[in-house]
Image (cartoon, rainbow, N blue to C red):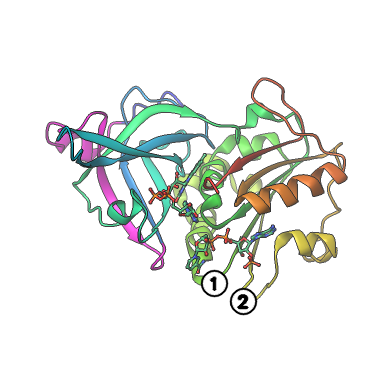
Amino acid sequence: MNDVTPVTEAQKIKPVPTLPDAQTVTEVKHWTDRLFSFRCTRPASMRFRSGEFVMIGLMGGPDPKTGKQKPLLRAYSIASPSWDEELEFYSIKVQDGPLTSKLQHIQPGDEIILRPKPVGTLVHDALLPGKRIWFFATGTGFAPFASLLRDPQTYEDYDEVIITHTCREAGELVYGAELIEGIKNDELLRELIGDENLAKLKYYPTTTREESPKMGRITDLMRSGEAFTDLGVEPLNPETDRAMICGNLAFNLELKEMLEDYGLEEGANSDPKHYVVEKAFLD
Ligand SMILES: Cc1cc2nc3c(=O)[nH]c(=O)nc-3n(C[C@H](O)[C@H](O)[C@H](O)COP(=O)(O)OP(=O)(O)OC[C@H]3O[C@@H](n4cnc5c(N)ncnc54)[C@H](O)[C@@H]3O)c2cc1C
Ligand SMILES: NC(=O)c1ccc[n+]([C@@H]2O[C@H](COP(=O)([O-])OP(=O)(O)OC[C@H]3O[C@@H](n4cnc5c(N)ncnc54)[C@H](OP(=O)(O)O)[C@@H]3O)[C@@H](O)[C@H]2O)c1
């Protein structure tokens, strides 16, 4: 699928770029007062592996001394799969955040800066072959999995695909819930992935601070065994299970320790093993 030339309608009509590495925003959706997603054009030559991240941003204000403008860039997981002709991002809105206080106001037709150098550890290449893959996310840590869940390779490589998403409030689960619903109902995705493969997908959303059908941190639900009972699966085993983790630092560290206790070892692009981790944000 990677040889599809990513030329979109928006690219065809886009004005001459005014920013370095400029891409044009094609769609913006606001999910809560703290979360939004957007799509933009994809550089024609940009290839990436589902799960990787890039640096994106906007031009910053003029430097008070030199008057020069510098790009204000941040790491963002690409939420769209590698075959998609456009790029999608799922973003926090930090009210006093240097980038997202401005980025949250983008509209279709606006330009963003995108450095087309994708990197990251949440890629299939960093894991040894296995039977079951777990994607563990909190908050915007869902973004790389939004990419991997729409990649046919995920279903070709594993017999079972389990995605867990823990957020404080129910509204913060909606982007993920709609995406999963979309995968099961979208004709293109169903054709691409196959109904038989889609039956491998299990979704386990939980909230911690607002009532929802399943409450609790995924770590606690695994420790008590409740998550495995709910999902109807056996606990993790290094022989069969592979995992990717993306969330806040405390979550990543706690889950990493739990996976090590199950006997799983951390892998990397250069040294594939049983699980990989990436931060959803820096602190
Ligand atoms: C590898 C990597 C991938 C990332 N991918 C994404 C992504 O896909 N989507 C995304 O929204 N952010 C992502 N981030 C975080 C992103 O780089 C920025 O931090 C974020 O966009 C806020 O930028 P800012 O300049 O507004 O505020 P910053 O100055 O960057 O952050 C201000 C504070 O806001 C909080 N914060 C920052 N990002 C988040 C977040 N995502 N969720 C909750 N709290 C946060 C932190 O407490 C941080 O100290 C990623 C970070 C890393 C390291
Ligand atoms: N989400 C909001 O409504 C909100 C509103 C205003 C400001 N903020 C601020 O924004 C920042 C990020 O908030 P966020 O909600 O996006 O992300 P977060 O604080 O990282 O929490 C996301 C989810 O991860 C869970 N979690 C945290 N540590 C964990 C661990 N060690 N193991 C398992 N699960 C763990 C949280 O559960 P717990 O709830 O049990 O911690 C929550 O359900 C924070 O500084 C926060 O103060 C958030």
The answer to whether any part of residue 199 appears in the image is no
Can you tell which mark lies on residue 170? Answer: 1
Q: Is mark 2 within 8 Å of ligand 2?
A: no
- Few, some or many C-alpha atoms within 10 Å of disc 2 (few <14, some 14-19, many ≥20)? some
Quadrant assignment, res 263 = top right
Q: CA–CA distance between discs 2 and 1? A: 6 Å
The answer to whether any part of residue 110 appears in the image is yes
> 220 or 198, which is in the foreground?
220
Q: Position of residue 267 (x, y in %)?
A: 72, 30
Q: Residue 276, relative to residue 232: is it above or below?
A: above
Question: Which residue is at 77% across, 35% downward?
Answer: 130
- Few, some or many C-alpha atoms within 10 Å of disc 1 (few <14, some 14-19, many ≥20)? some
Q: Is residue 153 magenta?
A: no
Q: Is mark 1 within 8 Å of ligand 2?
A: no
User: Badges 2 and 1: C-beta atoms under 8 Å apart?
Assistant: yes
What's the amino acid at mark 1?
Ala
Q: Which residue is label 2 attached to?
A: 212
Quadrant assignment, res 230 = bottom right
| The residue positioned farthest toward the front in the image shown | 65
Question: Which residue is at 83% across, 47% downward?
Answer: 236
What's the amino acid at mark 2?
Ser
> 246 or 124, which is in the foreground?
246
Please tell me in which quarter of the rendered image ligand 2 is found: bottom right
Q: Position of residue 56 (x, y in %)?
A: 36, 38
Describe residue 153's horizontal placement relative to residue 29 as left or right: right
Question: Which residue is at 18% across, 47% downward?
Answer: 109
